[in-house]
Amino acid sequence: MIAITLPYPPSVNTYWRHVIIGKSTRTLISAKGREYKRSVAHACAASGVAGRRLTGRLAVTLTACAPDRRARDIDNVTKATLDALTEAGLWLDDEQIDRLVIERGPVTKGGEMQVTVEVVQ
């Protein structure tokens, strides 16, 4: 099992931005989203799990410890977290995840995301 603590992710509402180029609209990762990916890559490197490239089927538990008591939709924190871990090389692709548990943890100064990953097959 792998356990790692990451910074609290941006909401999916701020992770993306939409830009108009000519007559088409493109969806891009926002500056906040790109900074989050860099922070996760740094945390993974510091904990020695960057580039592990886990294979097989995975079970992932996310414990979202918000930075304050504002109301938040718990499902808005998964996309940025899983995409950032994929880019950091913890696993090959988040398609490998067969079981995903998201739970609310205690309010934590600055916020954090506690992640555990187990290979199940």
Image (cartoon, rainbow, N blue to C red):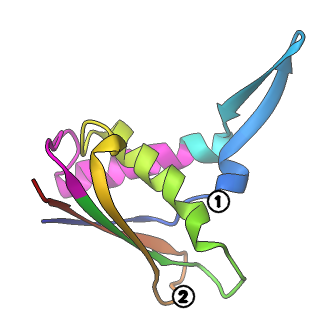
Q: Quadrant of residue 11?
A: bottom right
At 55% from the left and 75% from the top, the residue drawn is 110
Measured from the top left, where is residue 31 in percent x and y?
A: 66, 40
At 19% from the left and 50% from the top, the residue drawn is 57
Q: In which quarter of the image is residue 103?
A: bottom left
Measured from the top left, where is residue 109 in percent x and y?
A: 54, 83
Dot 2 lies on which element? loop
Question: Does residue 104 lie above or below 102 as drawn?
Answer: below
Question: Does residue 102 lie above or below 15 as drawn?
Answer: below
Dot 1 lies on which element? loop
Magenta span of residues:
35-58
Q: In which quarter of the image is residue 33?
A: top right
Q: Outermost residue toward the top?
A: 22
Residue pointed to by mark 2: 107
**Is 2 positioned to the left or the right of 114 in the image?**
left
Q: Tag 2 or tag 1, which sits nearer the N-term?
A: 1
Q: Which amino acid does label 1 sit on?
A: Ser
- For the N terminus, which image quadrant? bottom left
Q: Which of marks 1 and 2 is in front?
A: 1
Q: Which amino acid does label 2 sit on?
A: Val
Say the numbered circle drawn on residue 11: 1
Q: Does the magenta stretch include residue 95?
A: no
